[in-house]
Image (cartoon, rainbow, N blue to C red):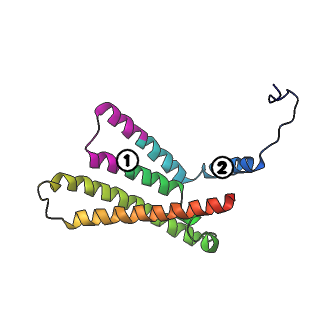
Amino acid sequence: MADKKKKGEVQEIDVASLDSELAAAKTLEDGKGDIFIKAAAVFAFCMTLFHIWTGFRGLYDYVTQRGIHLAFALTLILLTQPLYKHCFKDKFAGSKAFRAACRVFDICLIVLSWVAVIMAMDEVHHLTERLSNTTWMATFAGAVLTVIVLLLSLGSRRITRRLTRHNR
């Protein structure tokens, strides 16, 4: 019974968690008018519809299902986490030209990921016909997806390192 708090007792506030919640709310509020956040909301809705559709209709083959899911996820990440917030933040973040170039790069990565998925879906149907021969399209699609995944992996590691340093 001694552990229970009395009705009028003052509770201590965790300032660190309050600051992080306020920062998250401010970021959300700042991004409401952003065209990229609105586009991400549309893509998130389409991703939801895709998963509901495949839940009712049945799954596509493994390359199609996983590829479309990966392309949606990469699109959401690249739209909501712009490159200029994570790369060379201290040096060039104030430059509008740098921000625009980073956004163009983000959009190019989005387009390339969707192109690579579409190419992979086309290639998987022809794969059994020619198991020993690879085409330039298959090599290109694999290389593009590898580069995108490596870039995102390196970026997430950098962010994780900064967050763990910041929280100590």
Residue annotated with mark 2: 24
Q: Quadrant of residue 49?
A: top left
Q: Residue at x 47, y 51 (%)?
A: 76
Can you name the residue that lies furthest to the left here? 129
Q: Secondary structure at mark 2?
A: helix
Q: Residue furthest top?
A: 1
Q: Amino acid at mark 2?
A: Ala
Query: Would you say residue 166 sits in the magenta stretch?
Result: no
Q: Residue at x 56, y 72 (%)?
A: 97
Disc sitting over residue 131 in the figure: none
> Is 116 on the left or on the right of 130, as rendered?
right
Residue stretch in magenta: 48-69
Residue drawn at the location 26% of the way across and 56% of the way down? 120
Question: How busy is the neighbourhood of tag 1: few (under 14 within 10 Å), some, or many (20 plus)?
Answer: some
Residue 61 spot, x, y in % from top left: 25, 44
Measuring from the top left, give residue 32's x and y in whole percent.
60, 48
**Taking 76 as reference, is 9 above or below it?**
above
Task: Give the prevailing secondary structure in the magenta stretch.
Answer: helix
x and y percent of residue 21 in the render?
69, 47
